[in-house]
């Protein structure tokens, strides 16, 4: 039987047949544990010590749970309770064992006495209870003396946690000018203590900062406005501190605070006002349309949509000359030019501008009016303007046969300024590259300067300029379109060369050809041509012409019996006249060949030589003659080809120093004085070349390969690059039809003109009697050392190295 110490307030009966007694912190009254519910009479008999016939021999104490306070701060282990078995005689033969949650870590038991202690600091907010199991064993045999029993240790709460605002700090917004009691936001604080035990978790709210503007409900934590007519323009931001205190707000309770940042949102409660009642502005008369003149601003203490403005011109003499718009970013009124201005016409304007709020709130209309006006005075400043043409566009029609120098239009421009400067006229030559027209510099009379031809240019678009005499930078312009009118100045003619044929067996009245004509003129009533035979062929016995009255004509035969042997070709002159004024005409020739035809009129032959061949010459004989001619041609080509291959190429001695072309002649040279044997132009120095100088040629004999230097154009010599010189020589060699057909060696010596040393050629040194000094070669470095030794003069003995 188990026994527990300090047990009280037992409320449950448990029929487990356990002989355990418990003493703990439960304040339990003594009860009896039985297997079945004990009747009231049996319980009274048990308590009265009277013997009963069905009395059990063993009774146990029932126990529920242990209670232990949290947050124990003592140095010794906290005593929880005691377990004791009625079989324990106090001799240490019973061993008590504790198992379950926290056994051995949080709670320990004395295995001899059964005392339970807490060895760690307990926190109800971390763990509210522990479930443990107890058992009594025989210390010697380890046999259970009692069945295992389960019990609970509950952690009793103390007020050790202050209320906390888990969502703080808070941010809230409320419209300005809100009525008193308007809800702003609700704050909530939580307390980790046990709400079922005492007042440790009962929270009360209060306001520490933010009065008298706001208040808080002590139970719900709802913050409300407490002051009427709070103006955002006066104060926009408020910092409110709310306190939450447990223990119902009593003394000794724990408290927590949070901050609530409250912003007053804007409402349209302030009308716009112009800080300036009069604006003075100026604008140049040359300002383009939509250009900005100035800005006006109506100040509104509100913000956002409540500060939006709409500016309008409500009065003034400049309403038709100026316009106003609203800048959506800065809410300013931008005054712009609506139409062209003229200082000479009007020098100043006055505008009455209104600025108003487009978005109004009905409950604040009594604070209005929500619009304001200001006056704007605009002065127009004079500028030196370019001349202005009247009208701004000219269209002129002129016949193409107009006489040169005829005035076709008077162009007029004037200076719009008060000074009215003199004007000079001219034509923009980029618009009249052909220089067909001329304008008088002072009068502006537009005249023709060249003959006009509608068939060449039917339209001319020119630009006439007008410039102020005192300020040439001021130039005006006007477009002039000139249409060239047509006159009958072109005679009709055949569009192509007409050639027809007539059969030898043709009959009189047979159609030979249909002809037409073209005329470059463009008469108003259209083209109409008249056809007839030329006067010299009016009585032509062979052919006649019939006008079709549709700008075409038919050529017909007047007889039959044409023969090629008599006349194989006829040239028929045809007169073509137009219907213009004056009438113009031209004569075209129709070439008619006489041909032999078959019975169906198909041409067989138009060549009279066919009739001159012998009649006895058969087709086989013709084929034989052609074959012989072909064989002879093949033989001639073969002989020419063999002769080309037999010609030996020029033999070049590798040890010979070739300075010019390879030439072959039989006489002995005359040394350096012999300048006839080669072309000196091949040793050409561009700085010493003379334009147009003819190259020297060999007089005593003609070399087989002549120098090609004489064919070099002068432009090639000007090019100082060897690459360009070689390309020019190669092109000339390829284009020379008289050059040898086989490959040949062409040698050219070309000296550039970019060397700072000048010319090193000795070809023309013989013409100079002066001695040349080559001492400067010693200053040119190691590369010219050898030349310096050969040509330079040294004062001392030659070095040994």
Image: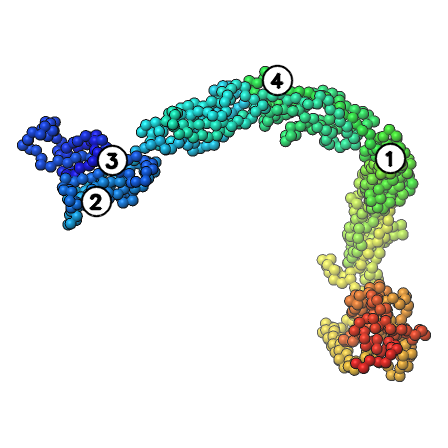
Looking at the rendered structure, which numbered label has been put on residue 368? Answer: 4
Residue position marked by numbered label 1 in the rendering: 411
Residue closer to the observer: 584 or 610 = 584
Looking at the image, residue 120 lies above or below residue 220: below
Q: Which residue corresponds to the image point at 60% horizontal and 17% vertical from the top-left?
A: 367
Q: Could you say where residue 789 lies in the image, as x and y percent from the top left?
A: 84, 77
Q: Could you say where residue 3 lies in the image, as x and y percent from the top left?
A: 17, 37
Q: Which residue corresponds to the image point at 32% horizontal and 38% vertical from the top-left?
A: 74
Whole-Å distance between the Cαs marked 3 and 4?
A: 76 Å
Looking at the rendered structure, which numbered label has been put on residue 66? Answer: 3
Q: Which residue corresponds to the image point at 72% horizontal and 58% vertical from the top-left?
A: 600
Say whether marks 3 and 2 touch (CB < 8 Å).
Answer: no
Mark before the other along the chain sequence, 3 or 4:
3
Looking at the image, residue 105 lies above or below residue 443: below
Looking at the image, residue 723 lies above or below residue 455: below
Mark before the other along the chain sequence, 2 or 4:
2
């Amino acid at each position: 039987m188990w026994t527990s110490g300090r047990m009280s307030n037992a409320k449950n009966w448990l029929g487990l047949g356990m002989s355990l007694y418990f003493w703990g912190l439960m304040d339990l009254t003594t009860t009896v544990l039985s297997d079945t519910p004990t009747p009231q009479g049996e319980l009274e008999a048990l308590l009265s010590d009277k013997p009963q016939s069905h009395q059990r021999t063993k009774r146990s104490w029932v126990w529920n749970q242990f209670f232990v306070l949290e947050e124990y701060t003592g140095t010794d282990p906290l005593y929880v309770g005691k377990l004791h078995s009625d079989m324990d005689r106090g001799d240490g033969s019973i061993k008590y064992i504790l198992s379950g949650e926290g056994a051995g870590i949080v709670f320990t038991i004395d295995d001899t006495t059964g005392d339970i202690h807490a060895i760690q600091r307990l926190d109800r907010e971390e763990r509210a209870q522990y479930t443990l199991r107890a058992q009594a064993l025989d210390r010697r045999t380890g046999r259970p003396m009692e069945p295992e029993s389960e019990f609970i240790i509950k952690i009793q709460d103390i007020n050790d946690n202050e209320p906390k605002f888990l969502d703080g700090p808070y941010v809230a917004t409320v419209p300005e000018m809100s009525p008193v009691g308007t809800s702003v936001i609700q704050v909530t604080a939580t307390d980790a203590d046990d709400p079922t035990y005492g007042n440790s978790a009962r929270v009360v709210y209060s306001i520490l900062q933010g009065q008298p503007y706001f208040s808080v409900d002590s139970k719900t934590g709802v913050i409300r406005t407490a002051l009427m007519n709070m103006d955002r323009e006066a104060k926009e931001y408020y910092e409110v501190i709310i306190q939450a205190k447990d223990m119902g707000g009593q003394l000794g309770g724990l408290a927590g605070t949070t901050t609530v940042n409250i912003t007053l949102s804007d409402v349209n409660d302030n009308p716009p006002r112009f800080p300036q009642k009069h604006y003075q502005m100026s604008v140049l008369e040359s300002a383009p349309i939509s250009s900005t003149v100035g800005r006006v601003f109506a100040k509104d203490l509100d913000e956002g949509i409540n500060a939006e403005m709409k500016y309008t011109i409500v009065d003034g003499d400049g309403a038709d000359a100026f316009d106003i718009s609203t800048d959506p970013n800065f809410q300013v009124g931008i005054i712009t030019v609506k139409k062209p201005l003229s200082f000479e016409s009007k020098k100043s304007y006055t505008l009455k501008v209104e600025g108003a709020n487009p978005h109004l709130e009905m409950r604040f209309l009594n604070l209005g009016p929500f619009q304001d006006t200001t006056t704007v005075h605009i002065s127009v400043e004079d500028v030196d303007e370019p001349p202005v043409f009247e009208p701004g566009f000219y269209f002129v029609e002129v016949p193409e046969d107009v006489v040169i120098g005829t005035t076709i239009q008077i162009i007029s421009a004037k200076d719009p300024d008060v000074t009215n400067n003199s004007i000079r006229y001219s034509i923009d030559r980029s618009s009249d590259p052909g220089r067909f027209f001329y304008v008088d510099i002072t009068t502006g009379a537009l005249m023709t300067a060249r003959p006009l031809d509608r068939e060449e240019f039917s339209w001319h678009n020119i630009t006439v300029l007008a410039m102020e005499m005192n300020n040439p930078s001021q130039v005006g312009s006007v477009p002039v379109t000139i249409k060239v009118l047509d006159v009958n100045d072109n005679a009709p003619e055949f569009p192509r060369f007409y050639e027809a044929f007539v059969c030898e067996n043709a009959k009189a009245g047979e159609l030979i050809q249909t002809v037409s004509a073209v005329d470059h003129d463009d008469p108003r009533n259209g083209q109409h041509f008249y056809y007839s035979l030329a006067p010299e062929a009016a009585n032509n016995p062979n052919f006649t012409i019939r006008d079709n009255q549709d700008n075409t004509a038919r050529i017909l035969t007047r007889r039959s019996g044409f023969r090629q042997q008599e006349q194989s070709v006829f040239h028929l002159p045809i007169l073509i006249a137009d219907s213009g004024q004056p009438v113009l005409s031209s004569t075209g020739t129709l070439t008619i060949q006489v041909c032999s035809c078959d019975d169906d009129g198909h041409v067989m032959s138009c060549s009279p030589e066919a009739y001159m061949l012998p009649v006895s010459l058969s087709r086989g004989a013709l084929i034989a003659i052609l074959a012989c001619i072909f064989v002879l041609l093949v033989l001639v080509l073969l002989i020419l080809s063999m002769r080309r291959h037999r010609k030996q190429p020029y033999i070049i001695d590798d040890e010979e120093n070739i300075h010019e072309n390879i030439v072959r002649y039989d006489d002995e040279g005359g040394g350096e004085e012999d300048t006839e044997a080669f072309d000196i132009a091949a040793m050409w120095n561009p700085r010493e070349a003379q334009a147009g100088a003819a190259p020297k040629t060999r007089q005593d004999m003609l070399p087989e390969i002549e120098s090609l230097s004489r064919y070099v154009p002068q432009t090639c010599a000007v090019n100082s690059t060897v690459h360009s010189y070689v390309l020019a020589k190669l092109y000339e060699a390829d284009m020379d039809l008289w050059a040898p057909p086989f490959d040949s060696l062409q040698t050219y010596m070309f000296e550039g003109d970019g060397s700072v040393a000048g010319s090193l050629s000795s070809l023309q040194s013989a013409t100079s009697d002066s001695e040349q000094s080559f001492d400067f070669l010693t200053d040119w470095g190691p590369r010219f050392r050898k030349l310096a030794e050969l040509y330079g003069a040294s004062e001392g003995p030659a070095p040994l190295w």
